[in-house]
Image (cartoon, grey):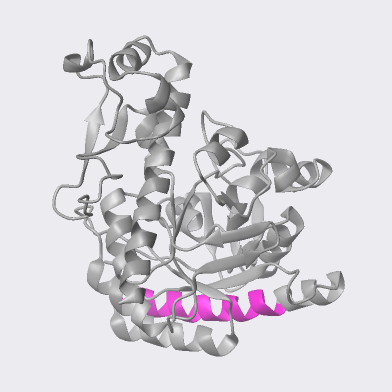
Amino acid sequence: MPPKRLSLIHGEVRLPAFMPDATSGMVHAVDASDLEHAGVEALVMNVFHLMQKPGSSTIQALGGLHAMTAWPRPIITDSGGFQVYSLIRQNPKLGGLSDQGVRFQPEHAGRRFLLTPEKSVQLQVAYGADVVMCLDDCTHVDDPFAEQRVSVERTIRWARRCKAEFERQGAQRGWTEGRRPLVFGVVQGGGDKALRGDCAATLLEIGFDGFGYGGWPLNNRGELLDEMLAVTRSFIPPAFPMHALGVGHPENVLACARLGYDLFDSALPTRDARHGRLYVYTSDPTKPDFRLQGEWSACLYIHDKKHIKTKTPLSPGCDCHTCSTYTIGYLHHLAKSDESLFCRLATIHNVRFMMRLIGLIAQHRTMNDER
């Protein structure tokens, strides 16, 4: 049976779960209280960015990520594998990968950084993460087979080193089974099913608490890689939670949940909110006849002139602070005025939309389990 929840140091996370990206320790435009009121149970933060700014010594001086951000619930830390791909594979002048790890110097940075599998785990543990992600060698789905094979081989070697360091950290810190972070491996292999299968099988042998789908989950046309996501999920037994890393469009979250994925994270919903792309249901999701089928959601573009005098809330049946208090017309006014309040209210709404979506998906899973 698929897991119903993750029991973590800072609380339980019901599955499925969508986690907003608080990449550098914050979700733009909102605070911890806004996120809690919207129903968020966990956040994703990123070691690649945090080690640069505010920096590890500052994070530890401020008491770790939870104390620094005033976020009391679980935090999953991404190892930075995808950011390395984005930075270095697309601009080799900024750094390079080797079996040792990753050396990089972001533009405008005053020094070079070295991120090894061991260092990634050490930082995530020191920051107080509830779930630690292994450092992986990320590729694009269209990269040639030879490059994908090198990526898988390196990802596996790094996973072994991450697991060994994780166990060393546990021995030094005296973790007990119920009071330790979880550690996830990341399945790479690009668009090759055999490589994905080999990577998954070896990671299962190494032994992890859960797994992530590695690599960009979309093709060059922005379409979800349904077949590859499905086959990768099939290689991991259902008892293990699986994270669809970087999946955040509502339609894609629903599609991946139907494939058996349990965890989702993305900056897309909050970034869309700040740019005036607001997620809405096409009918009231609280009604008994609502179904996640057909055209169940849409995007409302708040800058459109047609919204100037609209007196209704953004989305039917939405219980968020924004929809409970303000009209579309007022939000249009704030957006056109470049008022910072708009970013907060829009972000609250899109985050709550995602939490409601996850709740509807969970209800659907429960009904299927009871049949």
Q: Residue furthest left?
A: 294
Q: Magenta part of the protein: which range?
A: 145-164
Q: Residue furthest front?
A: 288
Residue 280 horizontal/vertical position (percent): 27, 37
Residue 312 horizontal/vertical position (percent): 26, 21
Please identify the dominant SS of the magenta region. Answer: helix
Observer-nearest of 323 and 226: 323
247 to 152, vertically: above or below:
above
The quadrant of the image that shows the N terminus is bottom left
Q: Quadrant of residue 284?
A: top left
The quadrant of the image that shows the C terminus is bottom left
Q: Residue at x 39, y 54 (%)?
A: 358
Task: Indicate whether residue 146 is drawn in magenta.
Answer: yes
Residue 242 showing in the rendered view: yes
127 to 26, vertically: above or below:
below
Residue 191 showing in the rendered view: no
Q: Residue at x 57, y 40 (%)?
A: 36
Task: Indicate whether residue 21 is drawn in magenta.
Answer: no
Q: Residue at x 43, y 44 (%)?
A: 267
Residue 359 horizontal/vertical position (percent): 40, 54
Observer-nearest of 163 and 90: 163
Q: Is residue 81 left or right of residue 292?
A: right
Residue 342 horizontal/vertical position (percent): 42, 20
Observer-nearest of 324 and 38: 324
Q: Is residue 112 left or right of residue 143?
A: right
Q: Residue at x 70, y 80 (%)?
A: 164
Q: Quadrant of residue 304?
A: top left
